[in-house]
Image (spheres, grey):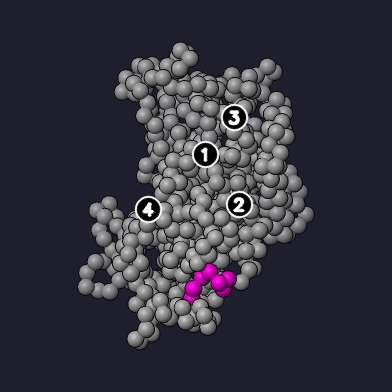
Amino acid sequence: MTAASPQSSSNGSAPPEHVDVLIVGAGLSGIGAAAHLQDAFPQRSYMLLEAREASGGTWDLFRYPGIRSDSDMHTLGYRFRPWTDQKAIADGPAILDYVRDTARDYGIDRHIRYRHKVVRADWSSEDARWTVEAARGDGGETVHFTCHFLFICGGYYRYDEPYLPEFDGLERFQGEFFHAQHWPEGLDYAGKRVVVIGSGATAMTLVPAMAEEAEHVTMLQRSPTYVVTLPAIDPIAEFLRSKLPVRTAYWLIRWKNVLLQSLSYRLSRRRPELMKKLLRQGLERQLPPGYDLDKHFSPRYNPWDQRLCLVPDGDLFKAIGKGSASIATDEVETFTEHGIKLRSGEELPADIVVAATGLNLLALGGVQMAVDGEEVEIPQRMAYKAMMLSDVPNMAFTVGYTNASWTLKADLTAEYVCRLLRHMDEHGYEVATPELRDATVTEQPFLDFNAGYVLRSLHLFPKQGSKPPWQLRQNYPRDIKTLRHDPIDDGTIVFSSRRAQGASDKDERVAIAAG
């Protein structure tokens, strides 16, 4: 089999272009999936369809000042490609270079079709293939492709529409207002008074970055977030890299960080009061004496009920200490001509207001699906191993961890898909379909995470089950065993070939499962 040709088929008389595996998305997950796939199957054809005009996903989309990772790059980086830059907490441009360098060095960039937004996929059991519909270019011309296996790697953020609450009086405000996701090119904020609304990773990145040039930056938060600081340059990583070969050092650093992340999460779950105490002590060492920690840094929830915000080298605290930044914990009552009036009656003057109010989520990239003409209602399906849907053949999707680096799970998901395809090749199967046949499995929310952006969108996602293999684990070491080493044929996935002459799909699946 050969790589995909450079031209996609239009909706004309010519048959749609066909590949073995079609990957949706050319960001961190999609490029990683392609690298795993071509390493495992050098002769298998594949293609990546990317809705935007460039690769990189999140790291190409967001352009706000100071954008950086909220995970260390030794775990956010790919398992197969060591992160070698000095900074473990890297800025957005460095991460984007890493992703694009990977695509170029592995030849993946030659398989990407830009400005192809996948809108629909239809499975035919008779043909054992997907027909994928995409809108191409600004005009939205409809084009079609076919594939044996569909791999959705577009993440779960909605790139075209951020979350923006309704603010009273916004039309009166005479300054500049915008969401961080739609950062204006060339914005001049030097000497300006800035208010950043939000308390998540975006806000805590923006505030110290803008404080370097702005007159003053205020982070306006409705409620506090747990914050932890780490050095941007990991001294242990630097030592190991100076003494060991690159890949050996990377492996050790990666596992050191995985274990530390896991320890933080488990301690937070089992002894939340102790974790609160440790986090508070870290803040006391970095903030000015007498700073009101109870008001500004004491959330109402337990650590890791929402993701901890990472502040590299304590840059947020340094800006607060210098007086170039401050935190206001209050609610917006209304915008005024020259700023924001708070519920407490205080008014924050502002020339620029940035909404860092979060993102909207989108299940499976918003792709509509049907199986043999029957629409797939995603919220009514259950997720198998958090990567396939019940009763949906030959389809997988990537969702990373909420308590650790996204790429740890993305790598494992891609490895599992390759194992699944190899198993099918070895046994002559063309179709793999997870089927929920255990009546004792009960439905649970797909993500057990209390962040607002998750709670707002959970109704759009599939369910997870009360026990494996339908249960979503936030546990990388256990997932290594399950996804990398456990048998593929676990009695839940039903394998089959195309419908035999005179036999129904169902009859054949039952026969294969029984035999």
Work out whether 112 lies above or below 206: below
Q: Which mark is residue 451?
A: 1
The verdict on residue 123 being magenta is no
Rendered position, 45 above or below 120:
below
Mark 2 vs 3, N-terminal side: 3
Residue 109 versus residue 231: which sits nearer the camera? 231
Q: Which residue is mark 3?
A: 299
Element type where label 3 sits in the image: loop
- What residue is at 37 percent from the left and 57 percent from the top? 377
Q: Nearer the viewer, residue 219 or 361?
A: 361
Hey, what amino acid is under mark 1?
Answer: Ala
- Would you say residue 494 sits in the magenta stretch? yes
Coordinates of residue 366 in the picture (x, y in percent):
37, 53
User: Which of the two marks, 4 or 2, is nearer to us in this view?
Assistant: 2
What is the secondary structure assignment of the residue under circle 1? loop
Q: Nearer the viewer, residue 466 or 221?
A: 466
Picture coordinates of residue 261, whole percent (x, y)? 67, 46
Q: Quadrant of residue 81?
A: bottom right
